[in-house]
Amino acid sequence: MKIGILSRGSKLYSTRRLREAALKGGHKVRVFDTLKFGLYLREGEPDVTYGGKPIAHYDAVIPRIGTSITFFGTSVVRQFEQMGTFCLNTADSIIASRDKLSSMQALSRHDVGIAETAFVRNQKDILQAIQEMGGAPVIIKLLSGTQGVGVILAETNKVAEAIIETLSSVQQNVLVQKFVSESKGRDIRAFVVGDRVVAAMRRTASGQEFRSNVHRGGRTEIVKLDAAYEHTAVRAAQILNLKVAGVDMLEGSDGPVIMEVNSSPGLEGIEGATGLDIAGEIIQFTVEQVKFGNFNVRERLSLTKGYTVTEFTVWPGASFIGQTIETSGLRDHDIVVLRLNRGGQHIANPRRHRVIEEGDSLLCYGSQQALSNYLPERLTKKKRRRLKKIAPGDGGGET
């Protein structure tokens, strides 16, 4: 198999380890400097050049896109996607994870623990945002920061206001996040590959430093995650459509608190802390996934006129509550249930004898006209909160 690695430096630890793992697996591999590509758009025939010369077809591309070249780097990844090359992480997923506000917005729709976050521009709203989080101390983050750069701990409300006002005056967008004091300068980096956590480490800040990033002198140690932390890490990566991700979580009093999801997580810290061959795991997963390609469900299904994919929550009083999928009439009306979510448990391809309960979330494919008859009225915030309080039923896979 021919694998291309997009990276600014072939000697960087992560790039070098991925190349070594690919060669060890018997694959042909080449490291490409991302900025040396040229993108050519022709009707029905998108193409790339490298250093001004055409390149042969590659089966897979592993993006290692640095923050400073996000726009051009993701354009290169997208071009390979259009050419039919499998990309380990897609351009859209990289962009979604790179924007801290956008990623937190996406995560906030789901039942995963996230740090309470506010984004305000009006100076009159700054104090209210801080008070909504219970007051200082709070964390202030630049939207584009990385490796702990642009992350500030504001000990008092006045200091927080002053920092935000100063950064806003120079056109810097910032987030305000609740400070999780019980984490005590520690966090967990869970390394997700596909649908599982392949390794995890705990990072502890050095001295009085509250940021635990390895690049800032943080110490690392291997850690065995419990089910809640593993589920949260995998779910966060899935929500952002990342096949490989580093999910950073704080150990809150009520469980995991997601702080950030990284689409190009470094390998040096995690391999050093755990002694595991993470690069080998990534290459193996890439090889297994190549045959499936970059499949965009909505893009493909939009080609079938009148059909769509949608997800909805079974609202109180729905006529098919207590009925099985078979007796509900869904299939008779050309609607297929692809997945059922109950209490955070995902049941893929649920069997026809599965009973539908109030509060279940159904992912369906079918005729738009038929689906419209089953979709509930848009729920108010109050009703959505009530649904979340419904006790979860049984979960897991079907047999």
Image (cartoon, rainbow, N blue to C red):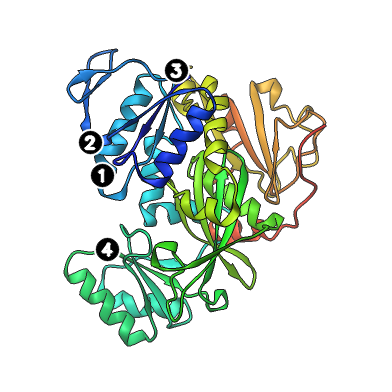
Q: Give the distance between the C-alpha atoms of the residues marked 3 and 2, in whole angstroms.
A: 34 Å
Callouts 3 and 2 close, C-beta under 8 Å? no
- Horizontal side of 90 relative to 76 (left or right) equals right
Q: Give the distance between the C-alpha atoms of the residues marked 2 and 4, in whole angstroms.
A: 27 Å
Between marks 4 and 3 in the image, the one whose residue lies nearer the viewer: 4
Spot occupied by residue 159 in the image (x, y as percentages of width and height): 31, 84
Residue displayed at 74% across by 37% down: 320
Amino acid of disc 1: Ile
**Viewer-nearest residue: 355 or 350:** 350
**Secondary structure beneath label 4:** loop
**Secondary structure beneath label 3:** loop
Name the mark on residue 173: 4
Name the mark on residue 116: none
Q: Give the distance between the C-alpha atoms of the residues marked 4 and 3, in whole angstroms.
A: 39 Å
Name the mark on residue 35: 2
Residue displayed at 37% across by 50% down: 98
Spot occupied by residue 198 in the image (x, y as percentages of width and height): 61, 45
Which residue was labeled with disc 1? 69
Q: Total of numbered circles in the picture? A: 4
Amino acid of disc 3: Leu
Q: Image quadrant for the C terminus?
A: top right
Callouts 2 and 1 close, C-beta under 8 Å? yes
